[in-house]
Amino acid sequence: MARDPIVVGLSGGVDSSVAALLLRQRGEAVAGLFMKNWEEDDRDGTCPAERDAADAAAVAERLGIAFHTRNFATEYWDGVFEHFLAEHRAGRTPNPDVLCNREIKFRTFLEHALDLGAGRIATGHYARVGRHAGRACLLRGLDDDKDQSYFLHAVGHEALGRTEFPVGELRKPAVRALAAEAGLPTHAKKDSTGICFIGERDFRAFLARWIAPRPGPVRALDGTRIGSHDGLAFHTLGQRGGLGIGGVRGRSEAPWYVVGKAIDDDTLWVDQDRDSPALMARRLRAGTAHWVAGTPPATRFAAAAKIRYRQPDQACTVSLDDAGAVWVDFEVPQRAATPGQSVVFYDGERCLGGATIEATDAAWGGLHAPPAPAGRSDGRAA
């Protein structure tokens, strides 16, 4: 019995190219779709989206599959970028890839793929789809160095049930080898980095187009003013470099690190200790979580967590309070748990979901004598 047609999100990179190749080799009815999600406004005259679209079209031609393009720039601006700017203006450090996956790649793209007559979608993400308790679930990719489940934690089981990740079972060198063997024009293309769909840019200059400078003092932990900054939005916790701090009289030549951002008086706090106590948090509070299964495993459970991409698993206890907030207590203190970033939870290979960090018990984290969250415990996640 023939399976439903599948539309692959061709980005112009090697991973999505090989995803389409593998599906084609499997005998699937495959089409490619390139998403343009950013209207170019490059000051240097380059146009990366045009190059990526051309590469995606060349891959589709090589594989002999239909190729479509769609412009989702309005959806991206409304659903992702306005939130990104608002978070930076509030002094937080957002992760647009998480929202981009949920709102664009696994909602808008999925809807357009279904309109094209597909029953399923595929992308080049390093992750896997499994089954748990009768529902689709999200599993880590087999390549630990490339696993992207952290960025996919807000995608629900309904969308995952219509999704395939063909390269999730492979390691990156094998993906490039397959692309080269098949003569795909993207086989040696450099991996993309930077803001989701916006790409590699001078981040500070890019952000300054929408966020006006808001200067303030830079202070050491003893309160001494040692410099000035042009806006808290341009800095993040744990940052080294880009602070404009030269030699400070009476201080060592050791580098300075951002350890706190005080929104009330626009002060940027710094220390020369990379693991400054002011930067360490044992507890954090996050907002309402997105659970892949639709519901949490329990109101209180043990799990592994990541507060940033590629971080090793951190043992913790997760508790949900009556207001919908998520409280996370770690076995060991965490460096630079950053408001606006995601804390993502795992039970073994399965990604349970995650939430946006709101406050921590670090010096400038916003938690002061936090209440102990209520909730029963059932040990490991169900």
Image (cartoon, grey):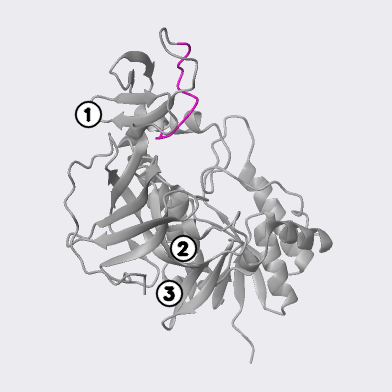
Residues in magenta? 236-247
Along the line of sight, which residue is nearer the eye, 11 or 116?
11
Residue at label 2? Answer: 108
- Residue 154 x, y percent position in the rendering: 41, 61
Q: CA distance from mark 2 to mark 3?
A: 14 Å
Crowding near pointer 3: few (<14 within 10 Å), some, many (20+)?
A: some
Separation of marks 2 and 1 at Cα, in angstroms: 38 Å
- Seen in the image, is 126 located left or right of residue 382? right
Q: Secondary structure at mark 1?
A: loop
Q: Amino acid at mark 3?
A: Glu
Quarter of the image with the N terminus is bottom right
Residue at 37%, 16% in the rendered image: 228
Q: Which residue is mark 1?
A: 264
Q: Amino acid at mark 1?
A: Asp
First in residue order: circle 1 vs circle 3: 3
**Magenta highlight on residue 334:** no
Predominant SS along the magenta part: loop
Q: On the rendered structure, is 161 left or right of 229?
A: right
Check the image and report above or below for 53 versus 122.
above
Q: Is residue 183 left or right of residue 325?
A: right
In the rendered structure, find residue 158 and report the number of the disc placed on it: 3
Q: In what element is the residue under mark 3?
A: helix
Please indicate, yes or no, whether residue 26 appears anywhere in the rendered image: yes
* Figure check: 222 above or below 249: below
Where the C terminus falls, by quadrant? bottom left
